Amino acid sequence: MISVSRVVKSYGSGAAQVRALDDVTMSVEKGEIFGVVGQSGAGKSTLIRTINSLEQPDSGTVHVGGRDMTKLAGRELRQARHDIGMIFQHFNLLSGRTVRANVELSLEITGAGRAQRRTRALEILELVDLHGKADAYPAQLSGGQKQRVGIARALASNPSVLLSDEATSALDPDTTRQILDLIRQLSKDLSLTVLLITHEMDVVKRICDSAAVMSQGRILEQGSVEKLLTTEKSLLGQALFPLGDIPPTSNAVVEITFTGVATDRPVIAQLARQHGIDVGILGAAVETIHGRQTGRTRLELPGDERTVSGAVADLRSQGLYVEVIK
Amino acid sequence: MIDRNDPYFWADLLDTILRGAGETFYTVGVSLLLTVLFGLAAGVLLVTTEAHGLLARPFGSRALGVALNRVLDVVVNIGRSIPFIILMILLIPFTRLLVGSFIGPTAAIVPLSIAGIPFFARLVEIGIREVPRGLVEAAQSLGATRWTILTKVLVAEAVPALALGLSTTVVGLIGYSAMVGAVGGGGLGDVAFRYGYQRYSPEYMFAVVILLILLVQLFQSLGNFAARRLSHR
C-alpha cells in the first residue's frame, strides 16, 4: 500500500548538512499497522511527512496506493491527500471551531455539501465515541478526547491510509492504550492501512503488525514484529525485552524467546530434569503482544559444551527461538 | 472668545460637537475600512511570504516571495516610522491628486488610511504568527488549498487577536483624526482646536475631550468583549 524507495532528504548545506533520511526503503502492506520506532531526531517525522508529501524528498520515490507522491503537485496532490488521513502529537485542532466543525473542515475541503457534512461528521464522531461532544470546543476536552476528534477529522473523508505522527506521545498511559485500541479497531473495521511513528516501544507492542527501527536517518531493521523478536541481535527484541547486562560468568548463557505456544510449558524444569543442568535464571521479561504472551528468558547453563549444545538443540526442536549469547 | 452668556451657547456647542463627531465618524469609519482591507492583506502577506510560509512561493517563484516580503516589510516600517503630523504634510500632493483637495473630512481619509494600514498590518502579523504551525500542516494533510488554509485556518484562528488589534487601531485612528482636524480635516479635533484653543472656550475643549475619552473606552471595551467571545482557547 505504501512503498518508500531509496529516499534521501537533507537539511542545511555544507558542513552543517544533516541527512534526515539516508537511503530509506520500506514497505507497508495493505491493512497492516506498521510502526516506525526511534529516538527523536532519528528522521521518523521527516519520513512520515514524505508519505503525504508535506516534505519533498531530495531523491527516491514514495508510492501510496500506486501513486507516486513525489510526482504530484497542485490539484492532484490535494486529491491524493484526501485518501491519506493524518493525526498529530498535539492534535492540531482549530480552537475556534466546535468538535463537529473541526471534523467538517475535512469535508469542506473535499467539497461535500452542508447536509452531507453534518451527517457524516456526526456519524464519524459516533465511531470515535464522541457524539455527546459535537458542540464542545477543543479547549473543553481532555487530551484523549482531542485525539479522538483528530482521528475523526482524519477519517471523515474515508481515506484508506492513516498516518500517525506520535499521536499518543502527549497522552497518559491509560489514554494511550484507549487511543491505540481505537486505532486498532478502526483499522480493522474500515480496512485502514496505518503507518505510525513513535518513540514508545509500548505502542509497537500493543498494536503493530510490523515495525521498523530507525536511527540517524537509516532504517536498521524492519519486518513483522514476531519475526523481529526472533531475529538474532534484533534491536526491537532487545528494546522490548530489556534483560540488562550479562553478569560475569564462566558458564554458557542463552536467551530463549517464546511466542505464544511455548509459554505455558515447563521449559526450565524440563532442562533440569532431562539434561541434568542446574539452570540459573539471569533475567526474564514477558509482554503481551497482540494479545499473545511473548517473552524472553536469559538462562545460565552450567556444564560442558556437549551438554549445553544438546540442551540448546532440544529447546530448538520444541520450536523455541534460542540465541546463544556466550 | 465665545460669549458664554449667549442664550444659544449650549445649543451651539451641542450642534458643533455633533457635527464634529459626525465628521470624525465618517473619516475614521472610511479609513478603518481601508485600513482593515489593506492592513489585513499586508499583515497576512508579511507572515506567509517568509521562508517555509504558506505563500513562500507565490506563482511558484521563491524570488517573488522574498521580494514581496522585503518590500512589504520596508514599506510598513517606513509608514510606522514617520510621525503622523509629518506624514500628513508629506502626503498633501498625493491627497490632492486623489481627492482634489487636501482640506476637509474626505481628504483626511488619505493620511489616516496610510498611517493606519502599516499599524494594523503589524498587529495582524502578530496575530497570525500566533496561530500554531501545526494547524496549517493539519489542513495541508487534509488536502486544503492555500486559500482555504489562509481563510479557514490562519485568519479564522487569529480572529480574537484581530478583534483586539482592530480596537487598538480604531483608538489610534481617532487620535490621528484629531490631529488631521487641527490642520483642516474637520471632525472633533477641528472643534477642539478652533473653538477650544483659538477662541478660548474651555467648555468646547472639555466637551471634545470627554467625548473622545468615551469613544476610546467604548471601542476598547467592544474589542475586548469581542475577543473574549470569539476566543475558545
Image (spheres, coloured by chain):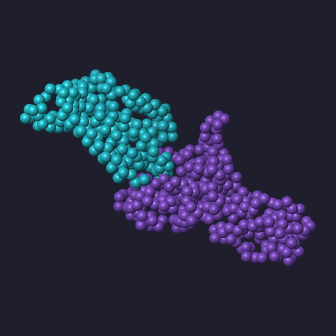
Chain colours: A purple, B cyan
In which quarter of the view is residue A110 placed? bottom left
Q: Name the one closer to the observer, A184 or B75.
A: B75
Marks counted in the figure total: 0
Q: Which residue lies at the image location 32% right of the left edge and 44% below the top edge? A: B220
Q: Where's residue A89, x and y in %?
A: 54, 54
Q: Name the one closer to the observer, A174 or B62.
A: A174
Image quadrant where one finds the N terminus of chain A: bottom right
Q: Is residue A23 visible?
A: no
In which quarter of the view is residue B187 placed? top left
Q: Is residue B8 left or right of residue A276?
A: left
Q: Which residue lies at the image location 84% right of the left edge and 71% below the top edge? A: A279
Which residue sits furthest left? B7
Which residue sits furthest front? B5
Q: Which residue lies at the image location 33% right of the left edge and 42% below the top edge? A: B167
Q: Is residue A32 left or right of residue B210?
A: right
Q: Where's residue A257, x and y in %?
A: 75, 67
Image quadrant where one finds the C terminus of chain A: bottom right
Q: Name the one closer to the observer, B118 or A152.
A: B118
Q: In this view, does A228 lie to the left or right of B168?
A: right
Q: Is residue A189 left or right of residue A274?
A: left
Q: Name the one closer to the observer, A146 or A56.
A: A146
Q: Where's residue B69, x and y in %?
A: 45, 33
B31 lies above or below A116: above
